[in-house]
Image (tube, grey):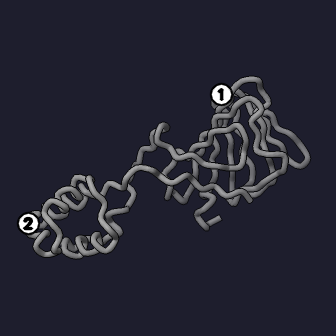
Amino acid sequence: MRPIHPEPDQGALRIGAKLRATRLSQGMTIAQVSETTGLTKGFISRLERDETSPSVATLVMICQVLSLPIGSLFERPSGEVIRLADAPRINLGGTRAVELLVTPRDEERFQLLRSTLEPGANGGDDLYTINCDVEAVHVLRGGITLRFASRDVVLDIGDTLTIPGREPHTWVNHLDEESEVIWVIAPAAWSGSA
């Protein structure tokens, strides 16, 4: 089975606004948090503006002072938007393909991957499987051939193929032009529920 893990996010984790909102909702000043924690007012101010990153121990201490469960700082907002330009790359082992995860990293119910495939791009010579219940591929532009043990299925623009999870297959962009496809994997391959 092929693993599906995104590249790490290079952007800083933005927790400052949540810390500031929590402090203000409790009527605390930066000076009071500073005095209670022993941290400087400047550090707390920079932290609330996401201009610095605290150590884990410091973050735990601030959360204790604010009576804020530390896990709440990392909760995913509902309706999270993934901008295509910010989507993390996925390496499914294919060649000549740019594959992006366009659903939130921690979404367990399904994964949506968007692949841009150069002419001749392929998923490898060997058939592979993905740990999921169902997999679907939809062609946005160009075309793709799905190869199974006993047959090939050619998909053109607008076509969609749905297959049972764990069915051995591979793929190839059989055209002399770039193709673009969407893959849907349910549940997410790393959710542990497949």
Looking at the image, do the residues carrying marks 1 and 2 touch, with CB atoms under 8 Å apart?
Answer: no
Nearer the observer, 60 or 104? 60
Residue 25 visible in rendering: no
Residue 40 visible in rendering: yes
Tell me the crowding category of disc 2: few under 14, some 14 to 19, or many 20 or more residues within 10 angstroms, Cα based: some
Tell me the residue at 40%/50% (across/down). 11
Left or right of 184, for residue 127: right
Tell me the residue at 24%/55% (across/down). 17
| Image quarter (top left, top right, bottom left or bottom right) of the C terminus | bottom right
Residue to which mark 1 is pinned: 141
| Circle count | 2
Nearer the observer, 62 or 134? 62
Residue to which mark 2 is pinned: 31
Tell me the crowding category of disc 1: few under 14, some 14 to 19, or many 20 or more residues within 10 angstroms, Cα based: some
| Residue 100 position (above or below residue 193) | above
Left or right of 92, for residue 122: right
